[in-house]
Image: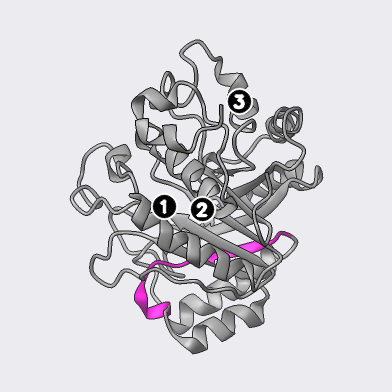
Amino acid sequence: MGAPGNIKIGVAGFSYKDWQGVVYPPSLKSSARIEYLAQFLELIEINTSFYGHIKPAVGKEWCRAALSVNPKFVFTAKLNRAFTHSPVAVLEPTSAKTIRPAATDEQDAKAGYDSIATQGMLGALLAQFPISFKCTDENRAYVERLVERFRSYPLVLEIRHASWNEPDVFRWIEGLGIGLCNIDQPLLGRAVGPSAHATSAVGYIRLHGRNYKQWFAETNVRDRYDYLYSTKELASWKDRALEVAEKTETTYVVANNHNLGKAAVNALQLISMIEARKVKVPATLVPRYPELEQIASR
């Protein structure tokens, strides 16, 4: 299943209720979701680690479930928001001054990541900062301290504000020995645009969708990620993924447009594009997204 340049393609999260009967068979138990997805993909980005710490026993079980069907499978995980967001980020900008992790957060977070890393299945740890986290001397110093705290993991930085989009910043990130996440997002305000950067041995791409209308709407957060990429839009990211892969040892491509299984659709399409072959597709997904018929193996 491996793609050229060791590109691994997958989805952000797996425990969405609206995937039942769409990505997953209607009767599939929640405990079997990872094992089911691993039949079709090589990667899941764990997003629950952003909201709470992974329980070590759970992390080990996730690894067991994935390996039972796919020996090439890996996880990436989002760094807990205590280290990347103000605890009241909806009310104040995130900065070095407003990020306030609790005394036990580092220990608890590392226990969860280690449960996966010790199995050789933690491909990267993603530190995702919001667009309010701007490139200032104080914030750069905070990132440096964060890198020291989590240097034992393959760390990747996701920064969304265009103030970071400077050659000297890329050289600084490379000097820290960490990866830089390339993202696709609605280009609102000073949002950073599409790129193909590689600053470490780990390449990373995240596709958030382009739902301009709902991106900052105060509705169900799921609506923000209600976007299905067209084949033409994916083709440009295929090219960027291949470009990043030429400069890295492993590149992770994560579809985060998860509403109603759209991330799974686009991930499978990207695998088909990059590997130039038909792919195994969940049977329940094809009736909802008939465009998959042309890439589905029989």
Tags 2 and 1 in contact by the CB under 8 Å rule? yes
The percent position of residue 47, horizontal first and vertical second, equals: 52, 43
Q: Which residue is mark 3?
A: 36
Q: Kindly identify which numbered label has been placed on residue 72.
A: none
The mark closer to the camera, 1 or 3, is: 3
Q: Amino acid at mark 2?
A: Ala
Q: Which residue is mark 2?
A: 82
Q: Is residue 146 visible?
A: no
Looking at the rendered structure, the kind of residue marked 1 is Pro
| The one of 259 and 90 positioned closer to us in this rendering | 259
Mark sitting on residue 87 = 1
Q: Is residue 159 magenta?
A: yes
The kind of residue tagged 3 is Tyr
Whole-angstrom CA distance, mark 1 to mark 3, is 34 Å
Q: Is residue 295 visible?
A: yes
Mark 1 element type: loop
Rendered residue at 64%/30% (across/down)? 39
Q: Nearer the viewer, residue 22 or 116?
A: 22
Closer to viewer: mark 2 or mark 3? 3
Query: Could you tell me which secondary element the residue under label 2 belongs to?
Result: helix
Q: How would you rate the neighbour count of disc 1 (Cα within 10 Å): few for under 14, some for 14-19, many for 20 or more? A: some
Which range of residues does the magenta coloring cover?
153-164
